[in-house]
Image: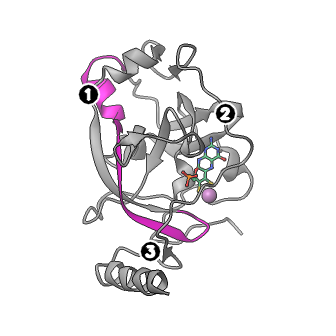
């Protein structure tokens, strides 16, 4: 009983702060949602690839990736299945960091990015959004390495940064768990859920859930 009251109270607080998009409600847990099995990752064989419309394709192994400067972000995550989780803390690498380090040179024709994950999962976003402060290639959640079911060892994560209404924010499926590559494209290419009829733009404030 106590927990149900607390959840409601927390939800009212978030609502009063304007942090609950239409149709969403607060969850105190961190649900697990994905299609297919959870991969087992051997870090000695893991790599992350960047290809397509870039000056040079880039491959980073686990050690190389972890030598990059890390960023910590507090975000509100909004799942299209209507749960929202507030103030979740993520640590990882911004795409901007790869550019600043001179590792990644994106060609001017690139306008879209397809995230590629284990087992062929994909999801697409405009490059402009991938370069925002609210898209992270994350290794840690809540100070710990991300758990297997939430995307270990690396996932894309996108959410709302409170107070940053200037940042476009799509639903959480636009971040691929078990991320293995980013493909830079001139034309948009639909990902897994987008092909299945989920909204391509997926803006949480406009409640763009499906195309039907
Ligand atoms: N590789 C992969 N990433 C994925 C998915 C998936 O099926 N496979 N599902 C997406 C969906 S629909 C959601 S809502 C979030 C859920 O993340 P969570 O399980 O950490 O809550 O992961 C997204 N990333
Ligand atoms: Mo989802």
Of circles 2 and 3, the one toward us is 2
For the record, the magenta segment spans: 79-104
Question: Residue beneath label 3, please?
Answer: 21
Quadrant housing residue 166: bottom left
Q: CA distance from mark 2 to mark 3?
A: 32 Å
Q: Is mark 2 within 8 Å of ligand 1?
A: no
Specify the quadrant that holds the C terminus: bottom right
Q: Is residue 189 left or right of residue 8?
A: right
Rate crowding at label 3 as few (under 14), some (14 to 19) or many (20 or more) other CA atoms within 10 Å: some
Q: CA distance from mark 1 to mark 2?
A: 26 Å
The secondary structure type at the circle numbered 3 is loop
Residue 179 on image: x %, y % = 55, 33
Q: Is residue 28 left or right of residue 64?
A: right
Q: Quadrant of ligand 2?
A: bottom right
Q: 145 or 117: which is nearer to us?
A: 145
Image disc number at residue 69: 1
Residue 12 on image: x %, y % = 37, 85
Q: Residue at x 48, y 14 (%)?
A: 59
In the displayed structure, would residue 167 be above or below residue 45?
below
The secondary structure type at the circle numbered 2 is loop
Question: Residue beneath label 2, please?
Answer: 39
């Amino acid at each position: 009983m106590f927990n149900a009251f607390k959840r409601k109270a927390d939800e009212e607080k978030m609502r009063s702060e304007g942090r609950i998009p239409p149709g969403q409600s607060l969850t105190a847990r961190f649900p697990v949602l994905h299609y297919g099995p959870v991969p087992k990752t051997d870090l000695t064989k893991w790599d992350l690839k960047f290809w397509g419309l870039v000056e040079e394709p880039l491959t980073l192994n686990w050690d190389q990736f972890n030598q990059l400067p890390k960023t910590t972000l507090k975000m509100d995550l909004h799942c299209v299945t209507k749960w929202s989780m507030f103030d979740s803390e993520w640590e990882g690498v911004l795409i901007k960091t790869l550019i600043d380090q001179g590792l990644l040179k994106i060609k001017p024709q690139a306008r879209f990015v397809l995230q590629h994950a284990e087992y062929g999962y994909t999801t697409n976003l405009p490059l402009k959004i991938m370069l925002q402060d609210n898209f992270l290639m994350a290794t840690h959640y809540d100070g710990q390495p991300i758990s297997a079911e939430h995307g270990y060892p690396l996932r894309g994560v996108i959410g709302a940064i409170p107070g940053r209404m200037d940042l476009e924010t799509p639903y959480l499926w636009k971040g691929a768990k078990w991320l293995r590559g980013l493909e830079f494209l001139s034309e948009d290419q639909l990902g897994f859920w987008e092909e299945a009829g989920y909204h391509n733009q997926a803006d949480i404030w406009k409640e763009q859930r499906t195309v039907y």
